Amino acid sequence: MITSSDFNEINALIAYLKQVPYDVSRNQLYGASELYEGFNADDEASFQHCFDSRVYQHFIATGKQTSRVEESLARALHDHGMHIAMHEFNQKHDSRCYIGIMGGHALLRTDPMYSQIALLGKHLTERGFCLLSGGGPGAMEATHLGAWMAGQTDSNMEEALRMLQVAPSFRDAHWLSSAFSVMKRYPQHRYESLGIPTWLYGHEPSTPFATHIAKFFENSLREDSILTLAFGGIIYTPGSAGTMQEIFQDAVQNHYLSFGFSSPMIFLGKHFWTEEMPVYPLLQELIETGKYKNLLLTLTDEADEIVDCLERFRKA
């Protein structure tokens, strides 16, 4: 039997759900204009008051691992809505065309690898692939910049890259406003990409170049979503701890054929993946000794080789 005390607790919970700075009933993906609502490109300080920043400030204030039941429920309801929204987005695309691109958040816009990832993303998008990433800065931003610039000329792409170099790091002033400047100069409504960031790393701004953004509170849900959705394969660009985690989590899924088949694992950057972070030789050894099975590995420095590998897998 529900008592008057129970009703009071329910009413208090409902009141809490109404006052959090995010919509717990939302079941649509974000766009850059919604996530950065309140940001004025002419006033960098306005970033601290935009929707994304207000949610992050609330997230920190209530605890990354909150002990408050009402806050845990609010976050869970929000993340559930993101899952529903991603499911609806997925229905529009062939799962074999989903390609994940992983890499470091610290990659500078002035780094040659940034341009290489952006051009690769552009070529893949133009060939009908739908790109996914963790939705943050660095290699993730380069992924979505490429998808955004699909269909544009090479000279337009070069101009976009130059426009972004005024703020090489996401820690620099004008990082966000320069991105919006590129989007304003080269608007597009034809190509889509999906960024999947998290407020756990809310100090890293989400790239506005992703046309659809599924932002989560729970990072484990977000990581699993990226690796699960990328049925067409994953491209690993130079990164650090987070990228290492994703490599071996992906390897486990492929080893066990968790979804009925194994997808390509492509490593961009021969020197990095064999010398600086020798993951590729380790995976080869684990395959040779039988510790891992079913891994489809490729190591290359060439974008054309990556495109050919993914095209072959899609057709197969």
Image (spheres, rainbow, N blue to C red):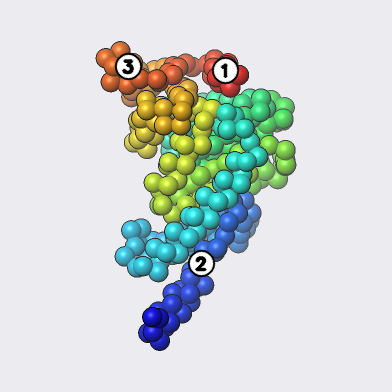
Please identify the quadrant where the C terminus is shown. Answer: top right
Q: Using the image as rendered, state which of residue 88 and residue 161 is in the foreground.
A: 88
Residue at left 55%, top 19%?
313
Distance from the alpha carbon under mark 1 to that under mark 3: 22 Å
Three-letter code, disc 3: Ile
Of marks 2 and 3, which one's residue comes earlier in the chain?
A: 2
Mark 2 lies on residue: 21
Residue at left 44%, top 59%?
76
Q: Is residue 148 above or below residue 304?
A: below
Mark 1 or mark 2: which is in front?
Answer: 1
Indicate the position of residue 270 as horizontal and vertical percent values.
42, 17
Mark 1 or mark 3: which is in front?
Answer: 1
Of marks 1 and 2, which one's residue comes earlier in the chain?
A: 2
Distance from the alpha carbon under mark 1 to that under mark 2: 46 Å
SS label for mark 2? loop
SS label for mark 1? loop
Residue at left 51%, top 67%?
21
Three-letter code, disc 1: Ala
Three-letter code, disc 2: Pro
Cβ–Cβ under 8 Å for marks 1 and 3: no
Distance from the alpha carbon under mark 2 to that under mark 3: 48 Å
* Residue 293 lies in quadrant: top left
Residue furthest out toward the front = 1
Cβ–Cβ under 8 Å for marks 1 and 2: no
Q: Is residue 124 above or below residue 76?
A: above
Q: Using the image as rendered, state which of residue 157 and residue 99 is in the foreground.
A: 99
Mark 1 lies on residue: 316
